[in-house]
């Protein structure tokens, strides 16, 4: 539970969305692209201070997970390229 669970969930969602993004059908789907790039909150009610704090925390986790996933993918690609030289 706790922080570890949140971190794992965020990472799993990032991997899932990355796989969807690379799928031949979704790659060309304009609505999916809009979904991935949409920034504003979709909530119809305002958020309290605790929710805003949690949002900032979760956004930071998403940012860290994204950098980790992209960095890991780059590292693996570099190793694969080097192995095939």
Image (spheres, rainbow, N blue to C red):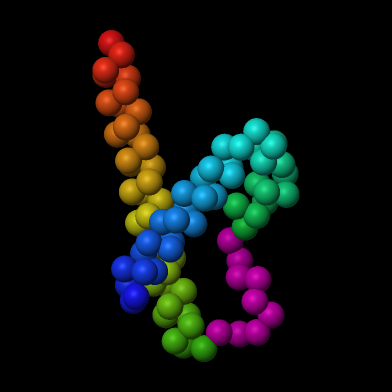
Which residue sits at x=30%, y=26%?
78
Quarter containing the C terminus = top left
Which residue is at a point 42% across and 80% down the rendered structure image? 53
Q: Residue at x 36, y 69 (%)?
A: 5
Query: Along the line of sight, which residue is nearer the eye, 22 or 45?
Result: 22
User: Residue 33's x, y, as percent?
Assistant: 65, 47
Q: Is residue 83 visible?
A: yes
Near-viewer residue (40 or 6): 6
For residue 63, say whether it is visible.
Answer: no
For residue 85, above or below residue 6: above
Horizontally, residue 26 falls left or right of residue 60, namely right
Q: Position of residue 42 (x, y in %)?
A: 65, 71
Q: Judge by depth and name the residue closer to the eye, 84 or 40.
A: 84
Q: Is residue 2 above or below residue 23?
A: below
User: In the rendering, at what x and y percent does residue 77 appear?
Assistant: 35, 28
Give the overall secondary structure of the magenta segment.
loop
2 left or right, relative to 30:
left
The total of numbered circles placed on residues is: 0
Which residue is at a point 61% across and 70% down the rendered structure image?
41
Q: Relative to residue 7, is residue 21 depicted above or below?
A: above
Report the side of 51 relative to 73 (left or right). right
Q: Which image quarter: residue 56?
A: bottom left
**Residue 77 is a magenta residue:** no
- Magenta-tinted stretch: 39-47
Q: Is residue 45 magenta?
A: yes
Classify the position of the N terminus by image quarter: bottom left
Residue projecting furthest to the front: 1
Residue 24 in the image: state x and y as whole percent. 65, 33
49 relative to 17, above or below: below
């Amino acid at each position: 539970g706790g922080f570890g669970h949140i971190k794992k969930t965020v990472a799993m969602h990032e991997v899932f969305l990355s796989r969807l993004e690379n799928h031949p059908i979704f790659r060309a789907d304009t609505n999916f692209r809009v979904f991935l790039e949409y920034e504003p909150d979709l909530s119809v009610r305002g958020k309290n201070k605790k929710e805003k704090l949690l949002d900032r925390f979760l956004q930071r986790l998403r940012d860290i997970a994204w950098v980790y996933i992209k960095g890991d993918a780059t590292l693996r690609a570099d190793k694969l390229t080097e192995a095939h030289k």
